[in-house]
Image: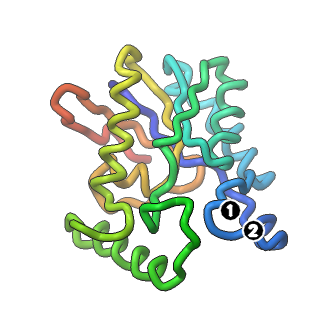
Amino acid sequence: MQLYLIRHGETDWQLMSERGVRGLAASLAPLTPLGRVQIDTIAGDYRLQEADAILCSSFTRALESAALLSRKLNKPLYVEYDLHEWLPQKDPTAVVDETLLMEASEGLRQEIDDNIVADDVPWESLAEVRERVMGVLERYKKFSKVIVVTHAVVISSLLGVKQSVDYAEIVPFKVDLETQEKKVLVHS
């Protein structure tokens, strides 16, 4: 399956901050005006015209990005909860533990920087992120080319390499769902 992994556009975190929104509720943050322009700009990329469908995270920043792309490209849009951002604690409904959040962020950096596998940790490991995303992709294997609008850590977990992903960046990626073999095609 040919994937075009796209990180959502720039997010309006200031809006959430001004309203005192924290924790999982901050996932309701929309795009900034610049974020909308970023998505409108990449909608003109010829590779996206070839896609059969668009999959996206249910978090507002990804959903808004995907909706803009769907409208511009005239492609069907499927919202998938399991394409959501990395969870710093496995229970997304629990009150955010600031100490655990700092420990989880450091643990994630070590996983990415040192390419280690985190076992038995209270946060979501990169391997767990990849597993849930692969489960989503499995359901769409009838398509040959798919746009996936999601989050930087989710993209990194699929790539399996330390790599920064900018807002609205397109990362072409090929995965064989039978063998789970993966290949980054071109990174611009």
Q: Is residue 16 above or below residue 45?
A: below
Which is more N-terminal, label 2 or label 1? Answer: 2
Q: Amino acid at mark 1?
A: Ala
Q: Please, what secondary structure does the residue beneath circle 2 have?
A: loop
For the residues marked 1 and 2, what is the alpha-carbon distance in whole angstroms? 6 Å
Structural crowding at the residue carrying mark 1, measured as other residues with C-alpha within 10 Å and reported as few (<14), some (14–19) or many (≥20): some
Position of 41 compared to 119: left or right? right
Position of 47 compared to 12: left or right? left
Position of 152 compared to 38: left or right? left
Q: Quadrant of residue 24?
A: bottom right
Pinpoint residue 45: horizontal percent, then vertical percent: 57, 31
Q: Is residue 182 above or below residue 47?
A: below
Q: Is residue 61 above or below residue 118?
A: above
Pinpoint residue 62: horizontal percent, then vertical percent: 62, 45
Considering every residue shown, the one lying at the far top of the view is 142
Residue identifier under label 2 = 21
Q: Quadrant of residue 23?
A: bottom right
Residue identifier under label 1 = 26
